[in-house]
Amino acid sequence: MRERSAGLRDGVGLSHALSVKPKMALHRLFQLSSVVRSAVSLTLRRNIGISAVLFNKAKELDPVQKLFLDKIRDYNTKSKASGGIVDAGPAYQKNLSEEVTKLQRLYGGGDMTKFPDFKFPEPKLDEVAK
């Protein structure tokens, strides 16, 4: 008791005791917060994994998306079978041929459905030096 009262008399003991307790409390709080943080992180990771599976199952059941994907797949099979645009009528073919004719006139002819073949001849350096 004497030691405690002696320390409190000069004021050092009380201020030291008051400053140590908040430091210990903060340290303990930080330790607990890291434990809580890791537990929350683990729980969120598990829940996100489960949510992704459930979301994918819910997506499969959406009738509008299913109808849209069915139409795209149907168009793809028709496109492969016809070898081009599906349900292209004579007006489309006429418009396409007119546009290709315009492009051939503007850019010098050739097959407009293929990528052009570029040729770059090597320059003759001897002729430039003369």
Image (cartoon, helix red, strand yellow):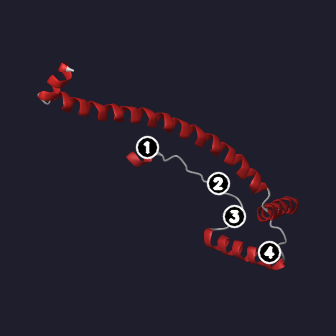
Residue type beneath disc 3: Gly
Q: Badge 1 local density, few (<14 within 10 Å), some, or many (20+)? A: few
Q: Is residue 130 in view from this perspective?
A: no
Residue drawn at the location 65% of the way across and 57% of the way down: 116
Task: Evaluate if marks 3 and 1 touch, with contact meaning CB atoms under 8 Å apart.
Answer: no
Which numbered disc, 4 or 1, marks the residue that appears first in the sequence? 4
Residue 117 numbered tag: 2
Residue drawn at the location 43% of the way across and 43% of the way down: 126
Residue drawn at the location 35% of the way across and 35% of the way down: 26
Residue type beneath disc 2: Asp
Determine the image quadrant of residue 8: top left
Task: Evaluate if marks 3 and 4 touch, with contact meaning CB atoms under 8 Å apart.
Answer: no
Which numbered disc, 2 or 3, marks the residue that appears first in the sequence? 3
Residue type beneath disc 4: Gln
- Between 51 and 72, the residue placed more toward the observer is 51
Q: How far is disc 2 from disc 1 in space, using C-alphas?
A: 28 Å
* 81 left or right of 106 in image: right
Residue 110 numbered tag: 3
Query: Which x, y percent locates residue 90?
Result: 84, 78
* 43 left or right of 13 in image: right
Query: Which x, y percent locates residue 15?
Result: 19, 32
Tell me if residue 23 comes above or below residue 49 in the rendering: above
Residue drawn at the location 84% of the way across and 76% of the way down: 89
Q: Is residue 73 in view from this perspective?
A: yes
Q: How far is disc 3 from disc 1 in space, using C-alphas?
A: 34 Å
Closer to the observer: label 2 or label 4?
4
Which numbered disc, 2 or 4, marks the residue that appears first in the sequence? 4
Query: Which x, y percent locates residue 66?
Result: 80, 61
| Quadrant occupied by the N terminus | top left
